[in-house]
């Protein structure tokens, strides 16, 4: 079953957040209401203190300013607690550079809502979800746990999704980037794909 256009459920989650220039970071709470009117990326990863995850999170940090320019917030999410996120942040050189929120999901409420929870091991799949300002999933990808993702490609997808949301009569071809030509279908795609 596709999750495209699924509205995400109400949630309240603790996060660890260390903004740029902040010496120690803080625990903050995020809810669905915080997302309304904004683009968001939920970046699920299996667990803190693992191997592939810090490389992905650092790659995402390298592109974070570009996501911010698009008005898009990044939420890293795992089934760890916010305390574990803080400990990992303080002990890992790569993770210690993160300035976007690390959402805690110890009860797996978010992982279940996004359908990436692995029940028998208590971890989430490596899932990436783009949520539009109405709180609906407009793109997602779930990868094998041993394969890292590419933040530049994710940024390109967000740019394309935002373009299409603004220019509903145009679509973005493969490898489209801002400024490239788009396509104008000669028939209505809504409900046909």
Image (cartoon, rainbow, N blue to C red):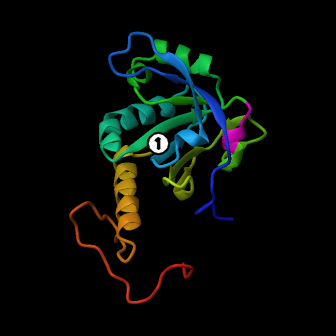
* Nearer to us in this view, 31 or 102: 31
Residue 187 appears anywhere in the view: yes
Image point (63%, 59%), residue name: 6
Query: Residue tagged by mark 1?
Result: 148
Q: Is residue 22 above or below residue 81?
A: above
Residue 105 falls left or right of residue 183: right
Residue 146 appears anywhere in the view: no
Residue furthest left in the image:
179
How many residues crowd around disc 1 within 10 Å: few (fewer than 14), some, or many (20 or more)? Answer: some
Residue 187 falls left or right of residue 11: left
* Nearer to us in this view, 92 or 155: 155
Q: Is residue 140 above or below residue 31?
A: below
**Residue stretch in magenta:** 107-111
Residue furthest top in the image:
23
Residue 66 in which image quadrant = top left
Image point (34%, 21%), residue name: 20
Image point (31%, 64%), residue name: 175
Say which quadrant the N terminus sits in. Answer: bottom right
* Nearer to us in this view, 47 or 190: 190
Q: Is residue 68 magenta?
A: no
Residue furthest bottom in the image:
186
Q: Is residue 113 above or below residue 28?
A: below
Say which quadrant the C terminus sits in. Answer: bottom right
Residue 165 in which image quadrant = bottom left
Q: Is residue 109 magenta?
A: yes
Residue furthest right in the image:
120
Residue 73 spot, x, y in % from top left: 43, 40
Residue 175 falls left or right of residue 41: left
Residue 123 spot, x, y in % from top left: 68, 35
Residue 108 spot, x, y in % from top left: 71, 36
């Amino acid at each position: 079953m596709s999750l495209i256009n699924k509205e995400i459920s109400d949630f309240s989650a603790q996060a660890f957040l260390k903004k740029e220039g902040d010496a120690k970071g803080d625990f903050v709470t995020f809810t669905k209401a915080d997302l309304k009117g904004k683009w968001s990326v939920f970046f699920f990863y299996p667990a803190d203190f693992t191997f592939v995850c810090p490389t992905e999170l650092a790659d995402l940090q390298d592109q974070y300013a570009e996501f911010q320019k698009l008005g898009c917030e990044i939420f890293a999410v795992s089934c760890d607690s916010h305390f574990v996120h803080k400990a990992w942040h303080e002990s890992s050189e790569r993770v210690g550079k993160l300035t976007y929120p690390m959402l805690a999901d110890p009860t797996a409420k978010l992982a279940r809502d996004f359908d990436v929870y692995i029940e028998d091991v208590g971890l989430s799949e490596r899932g990436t979800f783009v949520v539009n300002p109405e709180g609906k999933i407009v793109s997602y990808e779930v990868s094998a746990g041993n394969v890292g993702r590419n933040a530049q490609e994710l940024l390109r997808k967000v740019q394309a999704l935002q373009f299409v949301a603004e220019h509903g009569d145009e679509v973005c071809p493969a490898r489209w980037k801002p400024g490239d030509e788009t396509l104008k279908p000669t028939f209505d795609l809504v409900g046909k794909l």
